[in-house]
Image (tube, rainbow, N blue to C red):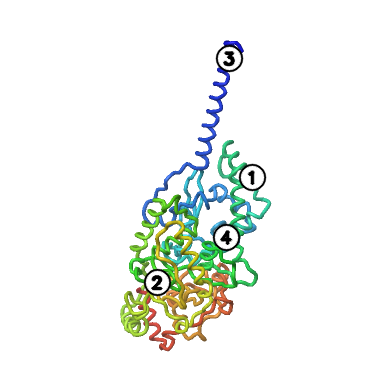
Amino acid sequence: MSEVNFRTWWQKIRVLAFIVLLLAVGLGWFAYDQLFREVEQQFANDDERFEYGTLGAEADRGIPYSIWLVLPRVFSDKLPGPGGYKSFGFPWEPGQEMPVGFSKKTVGIPRVTNNCALCHAASYRTRPDETPTIYPTGPAHTTDVQRYIRFLSDVADDPRFNADTLLAEIGRAQSVSLADQVTYRLALIPLTRRALKAQSVQFAWMNRPHFPDWGPGRDDAMNLTKYFMTDLPVDNSTGQVDFPSIWNMGIRETSLLNWDGVTPAVHSVLVDSALGLGAPPGRGEKPGPAFLQRMAWLEGYLQKKPPPKFPFPTCDVQAARGKVIYAAKCACCHDVGAKYTGKVIDISKIRTDPERLNTWTQAAADEANWRVMEMRINRPGLTTTNGYASPVLDGIWLRAPYLHNGSVPTLRDLLKPVAQRTKVFYRGYDVYDPHDVGFISSGPEAERVGFRLNVDERGNGNQGHEYGADLSESSRDDLLEYLKTQ
């Protein structure tokens, strides 16, 4: 080869190499911009951060926002009713683009994940024509998590979940660039569908024939923990429980947590809940700083968040009489620092529905603790008990329905003998009943929007906790008046 030809050949190689380099840089930047670029969220206050802030699960659990947005329109036939995502009972604040409990964060593209407020943001109205008041850290008694999970599974199995259908619907709401079309068609839509199908397999245990539905305001908490954090086989247990309030955690530092007291510390509850929602602890030998910082912020926020005040007038004279009854009948189990408060009352004494206890075993606790240790996360380990923990009653008025499984609609019902308690009622309606201290659970509107709970169904038993059942009607009124003030 002559020197001239060699130089010409070498120049062509250099040009080609430069073009390849430019293409690689361009593709790398495109991939970074579309899939990895993070934009930090901004919030006006701590309540807003709790309601809409990320737990860091976008990479593993995030649904592209544009896809999430159009799912109710494309698959309206799979919704429980009209209203899009509101049909699942999610609290939705005026002016917000998403329900409470949903976080939108840009990681390459805007993605949607869930956070703690999905199960812990209460909604109530003092009258039917009122805009709901939403109180973060309260029990999300209108939210039907199980129906939402089933909706995502159903749409992933539907042949309409394809690039042509979804891109056409996305295009009606926003302009979609050619680059975005390529990304959605080749990556985001098929990957999202695959992830939702995988999630459907993970949740198959909750769809077993003849097992009770959770209904709004409930989940099967320890089976969720067991099947996501361990490899134990699916068993025959069912343990539907109410979402608890998580405000005022500072006064619960010495209390056993979860309904059966298997969690010994607030930090443990937060870590296990965040892991269950897909928050990655980080890479390497220790949890990442982002994970630890989020847990520290949550713990500080929950320690100081006060319970809400009862939104109706109360009678001071009647409440004063009720305080005396409370001191005699209730304080030893429910006052901060009292003998039995925050401790487990054996099932033989409390006599409430035992099904929830059967969902959690020592084998499950041991394996869950081992899995968390493998992640190098330091938290007090889960245990097992044979009863239910006795809680502080702060903000008790907004924690209806009552008992661990939400099988008693009002405090008035709870203070009656078991034989006199309501057997069938509708939960999930958010208009409040100040007389009986709970949500309206019967009548046309409650039946239209609510979930029919039958206490004869497995895990829904309303027996036990008959303390106060011997009170006269006037004494019961006095005690209720005092409890409204807590």
Relative to residue 15, is residue 305 depicted above or below?
below
Image point (59%, 67%), residue name: 234
Q: Does dot 4 land on a helix, a strand or a loop?
A: helix
Residue linked to disc 4: 149
Q: Between 292 and 307, which is closer to the camera in this rendering?
A: 292
Task: Select label 3 or label 4 by which is in front.
Answer: 3
Q: Disc 4 and disc 2: Cα gap in Å? A: 29 Å
Q: Disc 3 and disc 4: Cα gap in Å? A: 65 Å
* First reached walking from the N terminus: tag 1 or tag 4: 4
Q: Which mark is residue 256?
A: 2
Relative to residue 100, is residue 348 depicted above or below?
below
Residue 298 at x, y = what percent?
Answer: 38, 58
Task: Select label 3 or label 2 by which is in front.
Answer: 3
Q: Are marks 1 and 4 in contact (CB under 8 Å)?
A: no
Residue linked to disc 3: 6
Residue 224 at x, y = what percent?
Answer: 53, 65
Residue 396 at x, y = what percent?
Answer: 40, 73
Image point (55%, 30%), residue name: 23
The amino acid pointed to by label 4 is Ile
Q: Disc 2 and disc 1: Cα gap in Å? A: 49 Å
* First reached walking from the N terminus: tag 4 or tag 2: 4
Q: Are marks 3 and 1 in contact (CB under 8 Å)?
A: no
* First reached walking from the N terminus: tag 3 or tag 1: 3
Q: Disc 3 and disc 1: Cα gap in Å? A: 49 Å
| Other residues around mark 1 within 10 Å, as few (<14) / some (14–19) / many (≥20) | some
Query: Does any portion of residue 48 appear in the rendered image?
Result: no
The amino acid pointed to by label 3 is Phe
Residue linked to disc 1: 163
* First reached walking from the N terminus: tag 2 or tag 1: 1
Q: Is residue 18 left or right of residue 320?
A: right
Query: Does any portion of residue 112 appear in the rendered image?
Result: yes
